[in-house]
Image (spheres, helix red, strand yellow):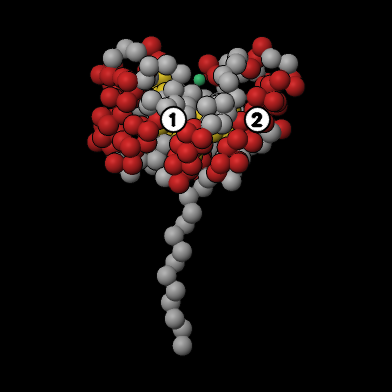
């Protein structure tokens, strides 16, 4: 007798294949990716994770290796990972990669991937260069470390502290299908980002966008 087994739920993609730098990913649907740079941060990352959890909203965190290396930072990375967020590499201590020699560039990236793998069991397949400063040399070194450059097309300028309303307006109104939205959970005072996040999530969903991680966005790319 044939017994139907329940279909296993599909595992969402957690990796990004090699390729050129990504700024946005037009998809067949209406998806956008929220991204948070410069954490983990003792003051702001937990509040951002709590808001994302309350709304069941997945995101992608581009983390620095150094703040992830202590017990508190490691616990935050584990919470990100277990909550289903994607984790990318944002270097060890946030240098401008284009000014470093090859060995130091590789060290910044590898040390961070080592920390992420030690905590989550997975090496990042994406990296985001600090300040967006990159060139072919840096991208080639990152590719040799198994990572593709993920930039953004929507800069909310939350780092300049324009006010929570302005951050919400930029994220919600400027987003289009496939947008990668730049936000920050570390690197400075991020109270405005924390204050803006709930309205960003509800505003994007009210416009019909689903929130996905960067690996999910890339997996949904519309064939060219
Ligand atoms: Ni940064």
Residue at 51% in and 47% down:
13
Marks counted in the figure total: 2
Residue 100: percent from the left, percent from the top?
Answer: 69, 14
Q: Is residue 98 left or right of residue 90?
A: right
Sort mark 1 into few (<14), some (14-19) or many (20+) by Cα contacts within 10 Å. many
Residue 29 in percent (x, y) is at: 39, 42
- Beta carbon of the mark 2 residue lies under 8 A of ligand 1: no
Residue 35: x %, y % from top left: 44, 30
Instruction: Let me know if residue 59 appears in the view.
Output: yes
- 1 vs 2, front mark: 2
Q: Give the secondary structure at mark 1.
A: strand
Which residue is drawn at the image coordinates 29% and 41% (left, top)? 55
Residue 213, position as x, y percentages in the image: 45, 39
Tag 2 residue: 111
Q: Residue 35, which numbered label?
A: 1
Is residue 26 visible to us here? no
Between 101 and 112, which is closer to the camera in this rendering? 112
Position of 106 with respect to 47 (left or right) is right
Mark number, residue 103: none
Which one is nearer the viewer's eye here, 155 or 119? 119
Q: Where 7 falls versus 211 (above or below)?
A: below
- Identify the residue at horizontal 73%, vertical 16% (top origin): 101
Q: CB of residue at label 1: within 8 Å of ligand 1? A: no
Is 28 above or below relative to 185? Answer: below
Q: Which image quarter: residue 158? A: top left
Ranked by sequence position, the earlier of labels 1 and 2 is 1
Q: Decide: marks 1, 2 in contact (CB < 8 A)?
A: no
- Residue shown at the point (47%, 38%) measured from the top left: 75
Residue furthest to the bottom in view is: 1
Residue 56 in the image: above or below residue 5:
above
Q: CA distance from mark 1 to mark 2?
A: 21 Å
């Amino acid at each position: 007798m044939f017994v139907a087994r329940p279909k296993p739920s599909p595992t969402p993609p957690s990796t990004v294949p090699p390729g050129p730098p990504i700024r946005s990913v037009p998809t067949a649907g209406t998806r956008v990716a929220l991204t948070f740079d410069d954490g983990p941060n003792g003051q702001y990352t937990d509040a951002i994770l709590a808001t994302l959890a309350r709304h069941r909203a997945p995101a992608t965190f581009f983390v620095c290796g150094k703040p992830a290396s202590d017990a508190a930072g490691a616990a935050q990375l584990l919470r990100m990972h277990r909550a289903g967020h994607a984790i990318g590499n944002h270097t060890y201590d946030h240098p401008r990669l284009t000014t470093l020699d090859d060995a130091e560039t590789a060290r910044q990236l590898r040390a961070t991937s080592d920390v992420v793998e030690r905590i989550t069991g997975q090496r990042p397949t994406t990296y985001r260069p600090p300040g967006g400063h990159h060139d072919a040399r840096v991208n080639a070194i990152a590719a040799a470390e198994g990572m593709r450059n993920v930039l953004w097309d929507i800069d909310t300028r939350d780092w300049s502290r324009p006010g929570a309303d302005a951050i919400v307006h930029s994220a919600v109104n400027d987003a289009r299908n496939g947008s990668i939205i730049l936000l920050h959970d570390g690197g400075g005072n991020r109270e405005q980002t924390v204050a803006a996040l709930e309205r960003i999530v509800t505003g994007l969903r009210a416009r019909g966008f689903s929130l996905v991680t960067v690996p999910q966005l890339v997996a949904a790319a519309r064939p060219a």
